Image (cartoon, rainbow, N blue to C red):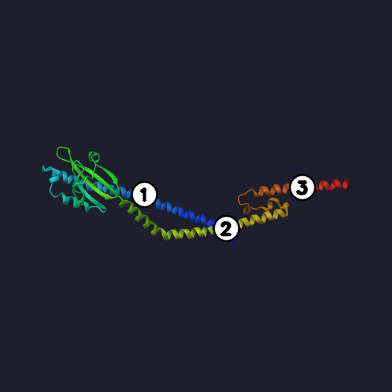
Amino acid sequence: MPSLKITARFIIALVGTVLFAWCAAIGFWTHDHAERRDAALDSHARLILQDLTLALETRLSLGLPLAQLPEVDRLLEAARLKMTGLRAVAVLDEQGRALFSTDPVEIGEQLLDKAGVRMGGGRRVEGEDEIFWLPVTNDYGSQAGVSLLRLSAGTSRDGGVDFALSLIVRAAPTLGLLCLLAVALGYGLARRLNRRLALASGALTQLLGNPEVGVAAIGPAASLGLPLADFAAATAARHHRLAAVEAELVRLDELA
């Protein structure tokens, strides 16, 4: 039966390694999924904005100002339904004020500063929202306004959390099997080490009782990768020298 301390240390080390590798894998996959999801959301939002902007620019060719275009509310509502997590879709004038919006409270409000309007499109996080916008131009190439999309900033984060939880649930049985395997492996390693320690202890005890055995007391299984054979040889040589000195002293005493 191996020592409980040795067994516990091996098992803790192996199970800890398994858990660390599992957590690292979950973190890596979740981070990669979050980046891919964020990129997909960005592409989807921009595609919706491009379609909306194209529809508005087509209607501007009728010669009407942006604020008087027909069926804009229907276009905004259709755009809002194309993506989950959209808070609002709006059309702004050249000053950044909302002319149309799927959220009636926003109409007339300043939704984008003048610097943002002049940027010609972009992406920005404002509080709990993430906004995307594109310029709306007329037939003369001048900017008539801005199409804007407001997305909940927590959409990507919530998706990452859900993905991580699904990975944890799916990987739990495999993790349990790996932990059991680590326990069995740790016990086996501890048992093997304990056997070799017992051989080394017995060899050293034999060497202590009879230094004459020298290297013969230390077999390959009892060396543990340590220079015990050299130690045994040095001990035997020292014992021989001491024995020779004692024999010489005895001879001198007899002569005296």
**Front in this rendered view, residue 8 or 220:** 8
Residue 32 is labelled as 1
Tell which tag, 2 or 1, sits nearer the viewer: 2
Q: Amino acid at mark 2?
A: Lys
Residue 242 is labelled as 3
For marks 2 and 3, the one nearer the N-term is: 2
Q: Residue at x 27, y 44 (%)?
A: 123
Q: Residue furthest left?
A: 63
Residue 19's spot in the image, x, y percent? 46, 55
Tell which tag, 3 or 1, sits nearer the viewer: 1
- Viewport quadrant of the C terminus: top right
Residue 98's spot in the image, x, y percent? 19, 46
Mark 3–mark 1 Cα distance, whole angstroms, equals 71 Å
Q: Is residue 227 above or below residue 202?
A: above
For marks 2 and 1, the one nearer the N-term is: 2
In the structure shown, which secondary structural element does the residue marked by tag 2 occupy?
helix
Mark 2–mark 1 Cα distance, whole angstroms, equals 40 Å
